[in-house]
Amino acid sequence: MNRCVQLAQRAASEGWDRERARLEISRAEATHLPSYVEIDEARDSIGGIDLPFDVAAAIDLLFEAGFPGIPNDPDHNFGNVHYHFANAWLKRVDQGELVAVDPVKRHCQLSRQFYAQWQPVVHGSRGHPTWADVRQLEGLLHWKLASRRHTIRNLRTAVELFEEARPCYPAEVRYYPILLLESTLLIELSEHEAENANLRSALELIRSARSCFDIGDPNFQHAFAVESEIWKRLIESDLTTREDKRLLEDFVERALREPPADPLAHEQVIGLKHLFVKKHSQWGSLLLDMAREKYAAFSGRDVAQRTLRMIEKILF
């Protein structure tokens, strides 16, 4: 069994504090102490809900007490270690263990403070991309909490954190994951407030993400699914305008150039275009009926006919 987990089980059962943990680690023989590989494995095991919370907390405590033999390399710098701890605790939050929220926040704060010392890569941004990674993790925490409490407030906070993080990534890195995350988050927020504004923001982000993929890139499928959902909601909620026709056609053309991961994918995207045309044809017919009724009362029927032809040309 992992020696770090074994030691944590003992620490949990005996109620060690940090000083006791330091004392026990200093007294232990070298052959009884876990290797750094075991420590890393124990840290990552915190995310497993089958590991009791008190043992998970004890693993955290033991690391803070300090183990000898931890490598001095990028994977084990202060910021990265606390980022991984935060990510492990976040998995417990995702599984409904809200008592894990505070450990996530604490480790994020420690990691963010470390990376705040690193210079930004993008001029004018708030921080280094690693600092932005922590902000993104904090955004994910609020997003997960939104399904359990203070829904709108947590969703807004998550959006703000993603917006703060996004400019920190250089364009040449083609960092699309945060674009996918934020656009998906905005779709969810649109269910609660400002439907059109949030969906429009989501569409802008997902179009930027789509530009990161070459034809045949398997990661395009996620972006395809997100953009399809945005268009579906915009069209079904009557939030599109005829000016959206070009944007939708651009999406359809790009999607049809991809080998479909799902045999129905191409049919779905063609269906969006048909739904768009149907919606706007209905609007056009309604507008023409209104125009015909209005101009029927005019004595100058030639003017009326020219006006109707002009409307038909614009609409169809």
Image (spheres, rainbow, N blue to C red):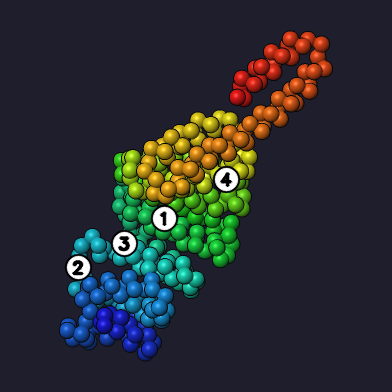
Tag 4: residue type?
A: Arg
> Around disc 3, counting alpha carbons within 10 Å, would you say few (fewer than 14), some (14 to 19), or many (20 or more)?
many
Mark 2: secondary structure: loop
* Residue displayed at 74% across by 14% down: 304
Q: Is residue 231 left or right of residue 22?
A: right
The disc at residue 71 is: 2
Q: Exactly how many numbered labels are in the figure?
A: 4
Q: Nearer the viewer, mark 3 or mark 1?
A: 1
Tag 2: residue type?
A: Pro
Q: Between disc 2 and disc 3, whose residue precedes?
A: 2
Asked if residue 20 is positioned above or below residue 162 in the image, the reply reads below
Q: Between disc 3 and disc 1, whose residue precedes?
A: 3
Q: Is residue 273 left or right of residue 214?
A: right
Residue 92: image x %, image y %? 43, 71
The disc at residue 79 is: 3
Q: Gap between marks 2 and 4, in whole Å?
A: 51 Å
Residue 316: image x %, image y %? 60, 24
The disc at residue 16 is: none
Quarter residue 240 falls in: top right
* Residue displayed at 38% across by 65% down: 87
* Residue displayed at 47% across by 70% down: 95
Q: Gap between marks 2 and 1, in whole Å?
A: 27 Å
Residue 118: image x %, image y %? 30, 52
Tag 1: residue type?
A: Gln
Q: Gap between marks 3 and 1, in whole Å?
A: 14 Å
- Mark 2 touching mark 3, by CB under 8 A? no
Asked if residue 244 is positioned above or below residue 109 in the image, the reply reads above
| Relative depth, front residue between 55 and 18 | 55
